[in-house]
Amino acid sequence: MGMKASREVTSDEAYAFHRDGAVLLKSILPMDWVGLLAEGIDYANENPDGMSSLGHSPLRIDQFPADRSPRLKDVINESPIAEIVGSALDGKVRFYMDQMFVKPAGEIMPTPWHQDTCYYNVEGHDLVRAWVCVDPVPRGASLEVVRGSHLWNVTYRPAVGKTPDMDPEGAKIALERFEAGLPVIGPESHESWSYADAFLDETLPPIPDIAGSKDSYDILGWDYEPGDVILFHGHILHGAAGGIDLPHSRRAHASMWAGPDVRYVHRLGQVVPDPSDLYELSPKTGQYLEEFPSVFPVAWAP
C-alpha cells in the first residue's frame, strides 16, 4: 500500500492552519488507510490494557493504542499522515504519541474544552494533532476549536485531576518529583493509569467557560467524512460538541506529531505519561525531542 496522500496539502490550507490553528483537509487520506485504521481501532477497543480509560462515560479513551495494535502501528509508520502533517508545517516531523476515542452509537456526549499541551511534558508551536475518524461525523458531534487560540500566550490547567487536599500524601510525592526534575507521572503508569492520577497545577488559570458563552468566541468546526484529516495545534482550545444522536459509533484516532521546535518540559500538572522508552533517558526541561532520536526518529522530512 502506498504512503502517498490522495492529494497534496495546498498553500491555502497550510496558511489557514497556521492562521487559525486548525484546518479540515478534505479527502486527503486514501480509503485503504481508513479501512486499516478502523481495523486497528477495533482491535485496540476489544483488547484494552492499562492505558485504557472511560472518561465521560460511555466514552472510551486509550493512550498509546498503537503500542499494542499492529494495524495502528502500521498507520503511524507507513501511512501518509506524517507527510500530511509535515507538509502543513513545511518541516520534518517526529511521532510523539497517539490516542483513540470511541463513542458508541446513540446520544453523543460532549468533550470538555481543553488544551493538549498542559496534559503532556512537551511544549512548542510545532506540536500538531492529526485527528482522523473512520465514521462520518456531523458538525454537532465533531471536533471544534477556538479559532486563533493557539496564539494566546497562556497555558490553562487540565480539565481533569485532583486538588492536593484530596490526596495530601500523593500531592507531596508529586511535588517532590517535580522539584527533583522527574516526571510527576512515572513509567509504572503504562501498566495502570487513569486521568484521576493527576494533580491539578493550581498556579495555572482555569479554562474559560467556552461552552457557556460560545457566542463570545470564534468557534470553528466541520462536518467530517472518512478520508478527511483535521490538523490542529496542540496549544489550541478545542472540544467536541454533543447532545445529538448518531446511528453508529464515532471511532477516532488522534496522533501527535512534533516539529523542530518541540521541547521537553517537566509539568507539575502532568496527566498523560511520557512515551515509555523516554523515561530511561532522563530528559531535562528545555531539551528538544530531536536530542532523543532513538525514541523520536524523523518520520517525514521535506
Image (spheres, rainbow, N blue to C red):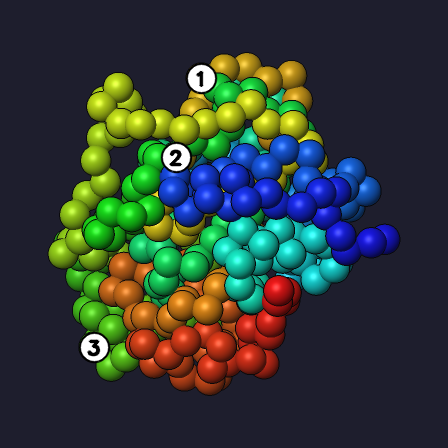
Callout 3 environment at 10 Å: few (<14), some (14 to 19), or many (20+)?
few
Residue 296 image offset from top left, x and y in percent: 55, 73
Q: Amino acid at mark 1?
A: Gly
When the figure is inspected, residue 2 is found, relative to residue 219, above or below; the finding is below
Q: Which residue is mark 1?
A: 243
- Disc marking residue 270: none
Whether pointer 3 and pointer 1 mark residues with C-beta atoms closer than 8 Å, the reply is: no
Circle 3 — which element? helix
Q: Residue furthest right?
A: 1
Between circles 2 and 3, the one closer to the viewer is 2
The span from disc 1 to disc 2 (Cα, nearest Å) is: 17 Å
Q: Earlier in the sequence, mark 1 or mark 2?
A: 2
Circle 2 — which element? strand
Left or right, 84 with reference to 170: right
Residue at x 29%, y 48% (from the top left corner): 151
Which image quarter holds the C terminus?
Answer: bottom right
Residue 287 image offset from top left, x and y in percent: 37, 79
Circle 1 — which element? loop
- Disc marking residue 145: 2
When the figure is inspected, residue 144 is found, relative to residue 153, above or below; the finding is above
Residue at x 44%, y 64% (from the top left corner): 273
Residue at x 40%, y 68% (from the top left corner): 261
Q: Nearer the viewer, residue 207 or 49?
A: 207
Q: Earlier in the sequence, mark 3 or mark 1?
A: 3
Q: Nearer the viewer, residue 12 or 132?
A: 12
Q: Amino acid at mark 2?
A: Val
Q: Which residue is mark 3?
A: 179
When the figure is inspected, residue 18 is found, relative to residue 68, above or below; the finding is above
